[in-house]
């Protein structure tokens, strides 16, 4: 039987105000109980309470992972990007004879998928629970 690990829990949420500049956005004040018994209040922004809480959880995950990612220098990320492009090129060109006239379209599609994946990962690391100008 698996033992439950103590987690942070939202124990109280209170609507603070509605946005005047962004229709449908709300600001909540959420009280969170920590595993050590302490509590803290954090602002949470979203279209509803569930959205606001998911943004708080997302930001905590990003802040937990970011220090490990930042240990890798930027030149290494650039080398990895070009390595991905190079390996994609090699793979597509090694099958060029069987792909025939489609090789160009498949190559552009593969580069597009690699670029979309890179942008999606980069977007995931942006903080979501940021203050909105109200």
Image (spheres, rainbow, N blue to C red):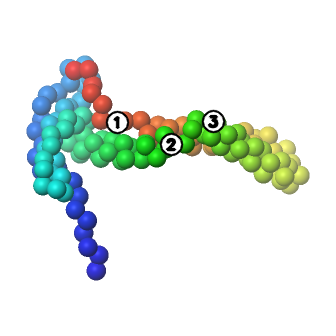
Q: Quarter of the image for the N terminus: give it.
A: bottom left
Mark 3–mark 2 contact, CB under 8 Å? no
Disc assigned to residue 62: none
Q: Is residue 35 left or right of residue 97?
A: left
- Dividing the picture into quarters, in which one does residue 26 lie? top left
Residue picked out by circle 2: 71
Q: Quick check: can you spot residue 81?
A: no
Residue 31 position within the rendered picture, expressed as x and y whole percent measured from the top left: 13, 44
Residue 95 position within the rendered picture, expressed as x and y whole percent measured from the top left: 83, 53
Q: Quick check: can you spot residue 126?
A: yes
Local SS, label 2:
loop
Give the mark, 1 or 2, whose residue is nearer the N terminus. Answer: 2
Q: CA distance from mark 3 to mark 1?
A: 27 Å
Residue 88 position within the rendered picture, expressed as x and y whole percent measured from the top left: 73, 47
Residue drawn at point x = 74 percent, y = 48 percent: 87
Residue picked out by circle 1: 128
Q: Quarter of the image for the C terminus: give it.
A: top left
Residue picked out by circle 3: 75
Which residue is more in the foreground, 108 or 38? Answer: 38
Q: CA distance from mark 3 to mark 2?
A: 12 Å
Residue drawn at point x = 13 percent, y = 50 percent: 38
Q: Is residue 22 left or right of residue 91?
A: left
């Amino acid at each position: 039987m698996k033992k439950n690990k103590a987690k942070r829990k939202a124990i109280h949420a209170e609507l603070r105000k509605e946005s005047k500049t962004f229709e449908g956005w709300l600001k909540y004040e959420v009280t969170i109980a920590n595993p050590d018994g302490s509590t803290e209040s954090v602002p949470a922004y979203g279209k509803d309470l569930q959205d606001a809480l998911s943004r708080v959880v997302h930001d905590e995950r990003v802040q937990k992972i970011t220090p490990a990612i930042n240990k890798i220098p930027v030149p290494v990320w650039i080398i990895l990007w070009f390595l991905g492009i190079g390996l994609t090129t090699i793979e597509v060109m090694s099958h060029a004879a069987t792909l025939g006239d489609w090789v160009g379209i498949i190559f552009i599609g593969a580069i597009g998928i690699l670029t979309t994946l890179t942008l999606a990962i980069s977007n995931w690391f942006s903080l979501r629970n940021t203050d909105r100008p109200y």
